[in-house]
Image: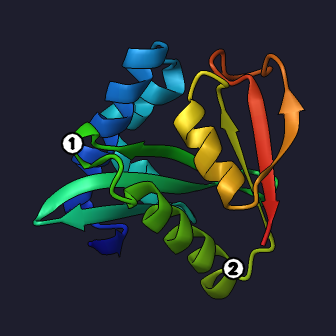
């Protein structure tokens, strides 16, 4: 498995994988539609996309999104169904946390998720993320849990 950062060739797959799981569990919100139409915004203005490649295929991807207040959000994590159970999510999590801490000098990340996405929540918990919000989110309809991690 090879992890790449901001690989332009991986961006369409990043968008497609995320749209797929979001539509399976929820529905596409406006920010999701923007991601599908313009995935390159996730590699601009301090944002980063990490993609996991197996045998030349994008097996999964995740983004690190900069917010106006300077905080960074781990967002848009998706693993192709045919590669699930092979540690792809863990490799992406390790790569993005290492990069945030060691290359960017960050000491804090946050994320938003949904309690229906049990596999993702288990991954986050295994990696030391803690819940900092439960209940409806003021911006995203599908987000009903927030988590954070001090690096």
- The answer to which of 70 and 19 lies nearer the viewer is 19
- The answer to which of 69 and 51 lies nearer the viewer is 51
Residue 18 rendering spot, x and y as whole percentages: 38, 35
Looking at the rendered structure, the number of numbered marks drawn on it comes to 2
- The answer to which of 133 and 9 lies nearer the viewer is 133
Label 1 or label 2, whichever comes before in sequence order: 1
| Residue 131, above or below 40 | above
Residue 105 rendering spot, x and y as whole percentages: 73, 82
The quadrant of the rendering that contains the N terminus is bottom left
Q: Which mark is residue 82?
A: 1
Inspect this view and state whether residue 73 appears. Answer: no
83 horizontally vs 48: left or right: left
What's the CA distance linking mark 1 and mark 2?
30 Å
Inspect this view and state whether residue 106 appears. Answer: yes
Residue 111 rendering spot, x and y as whole percentages: 69, 45
- Badge 2: few (under 14), some or many (20 or more) residues near its Cα, within 10 Å? some
Point 56% across, 41% down: residue = 120
Residue 39 rendering spot, x and y as whole percentages: 36, 45
Point 27% across, 38% down: residue = 81
Residue farthest toward the right in the current orientation of the protein: 132
The quarter holding residue 51 reads bottom left
């Amino acid at each position: 498995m090879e992890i790449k950062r901001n690989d332009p060739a991986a961006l369409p797959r990043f968008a497609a994988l995320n749209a797929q799981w979001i539509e399976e569990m929820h529905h596409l919100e406006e920010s999701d539609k923007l991601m599908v139409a313009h995935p390159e915004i996730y590699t601009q203005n301090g944002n980063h996309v990490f993609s996991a490649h197996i045998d030349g295929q994008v097996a999964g991807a995740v983004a690190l999104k900069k917010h106006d207040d300077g905080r960074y959000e781990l967002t848009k994590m998706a693993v192709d169904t045919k590669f699930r159970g092979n540690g792809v999510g863990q490799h992406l999590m390790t790569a993005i946390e290492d990069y945030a801490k060691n290359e960017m000098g960050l000491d804090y990340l946050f994320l938003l998720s949904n309690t229906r996405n049990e596999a993702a929540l288990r991954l986050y918990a295994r990696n030391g993320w803690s819940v900092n919000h439960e209940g409806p989110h003021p911006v995203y309809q599908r987000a009903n849990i927030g988590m954070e991690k001090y690096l």
